[in-house]
Image (tube, rainbow, N blue to C red):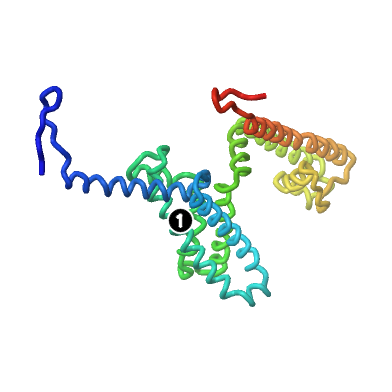
Amino acid sequence: METNTDGPAGVPIRAATASDVTLDQPLVGIAAIKRTVHRILDADARDSALERAGSLFLAVLIIANVAAVILETVESARARFGEAFDTFEAVSVAAFTVEYVLRVLTCSADPRFGSGLSARLRFMSTPLALVDLLAIAPAYVPGGLFWDLRYVRVLRLVRMLRVLKIARYSRTLQLFGGILRAKKDELGLILLFLLVLLVVASSSMYFVEHDAQPQLFSSIPAAMWWAVGTLTTVGYGDIYPITPAGKLLGSVIALIGIGFFALPAGLLASAFAEQLAAQTKRTCPHCGGHLP
């Protein structure tokens, strides 16, 4: 029943009716459920026991899946526990499928993605969402689509991508990802220098050693195998210079390789130290300033 009263400015005010309340309540309830489910699936949400339990369950399931994929390659384990592996895989696929669908449906609870269909499309295009999709996709690919069933076995190895899902639940991996993003320009410059060094080293060794070893240093791409092994100081020994000029050039390239790999190591070490120092700074609970 409606009653009209006059407000302070003489404007009629309609009292709320029972129909108004019932129309609003489902919307509030759905939004609250979406927010709760989103926080349970959010690895950074640790405020409640339910949120911590959700993160722990998914992290343990991911680790167990990676261990199962590894053990499946052991013939004796596969022969003895084959049915158990298949059952566990089916349960895991179902769990990860439900997780993926729930993440897509509740992504609008995160203000970064907005709302509506566009929010879901933006979420589905993020790197971690693509990893989630690839982790379950092989289970839904029928083997009859392939001429050779070996391709199916190779495709099922994509399940190992589930180990990347653990990045959500590891603060250390999140810290490492933040460092890579912060130092992407410096790392890109180092990678470019490495490519240039690789081309110069392999080209130089090809022209020096080709006449003496035409089968081993048959081309510059073939010499790149030697350059990679030398620059990384691995030195497989299957291909090496035998001429005096080649030995001298190989020694110089090996020394450059040792010094080169100290660059990204030092860069990442200093970035780690900066991030850890920033995280361990204490703040005053009253003014928010840094404490010594």
Q: Residue 65 sits in which quadrant? A: bottom right
Q: Residue 150 sits in which quadrant? A: bottom right
Q: Relative to residue 130, is residue 248 drawn left or right?
A: right
Amino acid type, label 1: Glu
228 or 92: nearer the viewer: 92
Return the residue at label 1: 99
Q: Residue 134 placed where, x, y %?
A: 50, 55
Q: Residue 115 sits in which quadrant? A: top left
Above or below, 274 against 154 in this view is above
Q: Residue 4 placed where, x, y %?
A: 9, 34
Above or below, 263 against 202 in this view is above
153 or 121: nearer the viewer: 121
Q: Residue 83 placed where, x, y %?
A: 56, 75
Question: Which quadrant holds the N terminus?
Answer: top left
Say which residue appears at 68% left-offset and 75% top-offset.
Answer: 76
Question: Which quadrant holds the C terminus?
Answer: top right
221 or 149: nearer the viewer: 149
